[in-house]
Image (spheres, grey):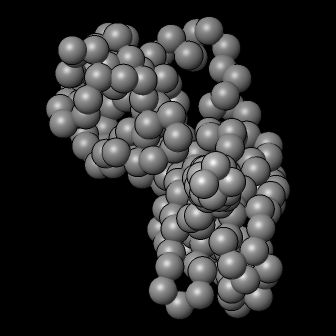
Amino acid sequence: MKNINRTFLISLMTFCFGIIYSQTTDSLSVYPNPFEHVATIHFDIVESDTITLEVFNSSGLSVKTFFQSTVLPSGSYNINLFGDGLVAGVYFVRLDIGSSKRITKSVIKVGATTSVLDNDIADQFLIFPNPTKNLITVPVLGSKKIVVTNLNGKILKSFMTDQQVVSLSGIIAGQYIITVLSNENEIITTQRILKID
């Protein structure tokens, strides 16, 4: 009787630990986000399948294709997305797995002028107050696009406005990236904001 119980216990432990450590879902991530020169596109596929991996600009036009209906074995993959040749703005990395699964992640490409600004220019476009409870002031005149993403790059809000004071209502307390783009989708400023209760 002791041997039967031990065998059952060992089998149960093997089964439980196998589930914990095995890759059970397809996944896609992009880092760092935002990026200037190079971002890594990482994806996992659970079983061999036909893969299409493309990058689209904010207008929905394909700007880079890594795989087009290519059969890949199961596993983890890292692909470099080089920023040279891409204008600053929001891009979407789309992974199609077979004919029934699609995963999309957003990534922000910053230019040298948006990531390294001298203090006078940076102060002109400083979003305030930071931290904030709800309202922020974006000191950019005229029409602009505001994109609010979490620290994983997921877009929570994206809208056009000509107002300088905008609301972050509907977004829970936490840290976020606010990106302000011109009508031509060029980044004016990108800033980390803390929303508090």
| Residue drawn at (46%, 31%) of the image | 177
Q: Is residue 130 visible?
A: yes
Residue closest to the eye, 59 or 66: 66
Q: Tell me where residue 23 sits by quadrant.
A: bottom right
Residue at 58% x, 46% y is 108
- Residue 183 place in picture, x, y as percent: 42, 51
Quadrant of the image occupied by residue 12: bottom right
Which is more toward the observer, 142 or 2? 2
User: In the picture, residue 163 is in which quadrant?
Assistant: top left
Judge whether 36 appears above or below 19 on screen.
above
User: In the visual, does 96 lie left or right of 176?
Assistant: right
Which of the image's four quarters has the N terminus? Answer: bottom right
Residue 41 visible (yes or no)? no
In the displayed structure, 160 sits above or below 189; it is below
- Which image quadrant: the C terminus? top left
At which x and y percent is residue 172? Answer: 26, 29
Question: Exactly how many numbered labels are in the figure?
Answer: 0
* Residue extending furthest toward the front: 1
Q: Is residue 4 left or right of residue 189?
A: right
Residue 70 higher or lower than 129, as above or below: below
Would residue 5 appear left or right of 37 to someone viewing this image?
Answer: left
Residue at 36% of width from left, 23% of height from top? 174
Residue at (58, 9) in percent of width and height: 120
Q: Position of residue 32 (x, y in %)?
A: 69, 39
> Where does the image place residue 50, in percent across and percent down from the top left?
68, 88
